[in-house]
Image: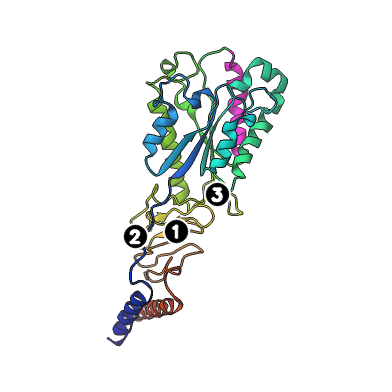
Amino acid sequence: MARSFVFAAGVWLALVGGLVALPRVAAAAPLKIACLGTSAMAGYGSSAGHHITDWMGMDLGADFEVKNFAVVGATALKQTDVSYWNTPEMKAAEAYNPDIVIFWFGGNDTFVQYWNAHKGEFEGDYTDLVHTFQALPSHPKTFLVRMLVFGNGPVQKAVVESVIVPTTDKIGAATGSFMINYHDQFMNDSMWYPDGFHPNDTGTPIIGKYFADVIIADLKAAAMDGGADATTDAPADGGGMTTDVATVTDASGTGGAAPGSGTGGNAGTGGAAGATGGASGSGGATTSGGGTGGSAGPTGQSSSGCIVAGAAPFLGPAGLAVVALACLMLARRRRRR
């Protein structure tokens, strides 16, 4: 009885001293997606409002902000008169400081006049482009689209198949980027490509949804791995997405994993509280480690089901001391049962 009284009193004092009004969880800012590429990404072949990026944004919903920085006719090659490196769109994309970047290059690079003169530079130039964005303050996740063309004109289909696609795979592995396998997914859907290169309004909704599904699947995989994903994860030095992905990949139930990828990821609205305790991602701070045995990342604290993780900013020293004492007594009480 005495222990129960002390515990109840401790919790009451903590609430009065530091949590009179529990802090409201602020809505996470949308994850920013920058779409880089050429005519297919820009929407050539489909009508306004029906481009791949439009449909992708609609499928992803309000938790994401999709912006298109593609340039018709651009190359990943640096030494051409249409190099993406020299466009205002690239500068704007960098200034956007995105959380996710999608790259879709390679077709225009095979134009005879560019390919014959600079084909030996394609892998290095494209790799540099990916690294340039990975080095932004946001340390974005990067996705590469595996090229697909049906026609053979200025874009050399044979070069796309024999060089561009495998080189893109190689760059993806070298940069830790996730591959969007557009090539294999739609290789049997030539009816959506009247000119052999650009999908029409019938194809773009399906392609946009596919892109959205790939992104969501990758974020969920990274969340379930505690912020670690073999193909897309941030480097060991803590780089990676710093934006909260909790609203995208809620995790609940027994031992649910709360996403908290990257440096100091914060699992807010999507924090897991399961029957046996939510587990936060690496560096994540849970706001509620409900249940027994809840565990938190390096920046959180939880023990014996006490709700203390993430409370430090809202409790004064006295309040924290009372809560810690109350939790300690509760833990001792449980051990003696």
Q: Which mark is residue 183?
A: none
Identify the residue at image location x=37%, y=71%: 306
Label 3 to label 1, Cα distance in Å? 16 Å
Marks 3/1 in contact by CB < 8 Å: the verdict is no
Provide the residue designation for mark 2.
274
Q: Do callouts 2 and 1 mark residues in contact (Cβ within 8 Å)?
A: no
Q: Quadrant of the N terminus?
A: bottom left
- Quarter occupied by the C terminus: bottom left
State how far apart marks 2 and 1 are (Cα). 12 Å
Q: Is residue 24 magenta?
A: no
The amino acid beneath tag 1 is Ser
Name the N-terminal-most of marks 3 and 2: 3
Q: In the image, what residue occupies the spot 46% across and 57% down?
A: 266
Q: Dot 2: what SS?
A: loop
Instruction: Assess disc 2: are there few (<14), some (14-19) or many (≥20) residues with their C-alpha within 10 Å of its C-alpha.
Output: many
Q: State which region is magenta.
A: 154-173
- Residue 157 lies in magenta, yes or no? yes
Please tell me whether the stretch drawn in magenta is mainly helix, strand or loop.
helix
Q: CA distance from mark 3 to mark 2?
A: 27 Å
114 is higher (above) or lower (below) than 64: above
User: Mark 3 = which residue?
Assistant: 240
